[in-house]
Image (cartoon, rainbow, N blue to C red):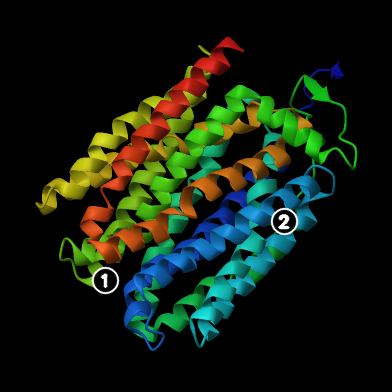
Amino acid sequence: MHSERAPQAAPVRAAGFSLAILTFINLFNYLDRFVLASLVESLKTSELHLSDKQLGALAASFIVVYMLVSPLFGTLGDRKKRPPLLALGVGLWSLATALGGFARNFAGLLAARAGVGVGEAAYGTIAPALLADFFPKEKRGRVFAVFFAAIPIGSAAGYILGGTAEQRFGWRAAFWISGGPGLLLALACLLLSDPPRGGQDPEVGAAPEAGSVWSAYRRLLANRPYTWTVLGYAAYTFALGGLAFWAPAFLERVRGMARNEATVNFGAIVVVTGFVGTFAGGWLGDWWLKRSRGGYLWLSGVATLAAAPAALVAFVAPQKAVFLTAIVVAELLLFASTGPINSAIVNLVAPNERATAVALSILAIHLLGDVPSPPLIGAVSDATSLAHAFLILPVVIAASGVLWMVAARSATRA
């Protein structure tokens, strides 16, 4: 049963402080993820002598653990105090990142990257649900635009910091420098308040019972707008995961850029387009939501469909001015979906099941998305070329847009 009550406004200062802290930590979340991508060519020629398939497996190992552990933290996040869980997660992933610098073989580096996934599973599932309890529905597009603006900034920082540290101090130091600050940021999580679940929503479901997690999963899977949204997100994540991991190598091998130029240029494109695209998408999503219940999803579907042809041009045009411009356009359109799609996920489910819904979406989008994409692109590259392997991505981007349009139609009719 649902009980009607007025939204309870969280203290403005507490909400703003929490958004600032969680966004700053999210920057390091993605810095630690993407420092590996900046080191691909260095690791290939290092004393570890890694193949493209092994390099793809390093990316997949993090994601596999991340998606498998996420449901556990989703359940805990809907039932336990959230700030201590966040602190645990930040501390674990930061320590694991630093330990990557001590790896002596492929197995050691694989274990370290897998350990990063454990910590980030706690943060990735709980932080969005916590933010949703600080802000009302009609502001969440902009709030999540701020929070997820850390993705391009942190990703770019990973490319740039990793590439610069590797050039000056070696690839091992890149892991140490990236992981160290997070150990201090873990303590900042303990300063956050934990607002009532559903306090910003008029309808709040009954608190889930300890053994009701499977019932929650069944309800989520029966939620058609949620299911279509997650399937579209999986296709989107497949494309972005493959692009994020292999783009610096693509620019170096296929387009002939110098190694440092490839990592720094792509990092700069990601940070600018990500910042602009994420903020523009958040504001446009909130504007569209006032006119349609599926506004967040319509925005995501339209932007992603438009990104597909731009991505195709980026991967086939040999002229530097053309392919760099096309990358900028494609990235702007792809990042426009970041805030709206995550806002849609938390808005489509009951407040007391948000962390579980986020966790289930994490499991699905990585299982079907960026777990298979880096090793698949690596395998196709080994068999043919990286240029041919990249042609998979525009097709998958278009599929994501179609699925989100279906989800938007379903949400509008619900």
* Mark with earlier residue (2, 1): 2
259 displayed left or right of 9? left
Residue sitting at x 35%, y 53%: 243
> Which element carries disc 2, helix, strand or loop?
helix
318 displayed left or right of 23? left
Label 2 packing within 10 angstroms: few (<14), some (14-19), many (20+): many
Q: Amino acid at mark 1?
A: Asn
Question: Residue 56 location in percent, x, y?
Answer: 42, 65
Residue sitting at x 73%, y 60%: 87
Label 1 packing within 10 angstroms: few (<14), some (14-19), many (20+): some
Q: Nearer the viewer, residue 147 or 378?
A: 378
Residue sitting at x 78%, y 30%: 198
The residue wearing badge 1 is 260
Q: Amino acid at mark 2?
A: Leu
Q: Nearer the viewer, residue 183 or 403?
A: 403
Residue sitting at x 78%, y 20%: 203
Residue 333 appears in the picture as rendered: yes
Question: Residue 84 location in percent, x, y?
Answer: 79, 57
Residue 10 appears in the picture as rendered: no
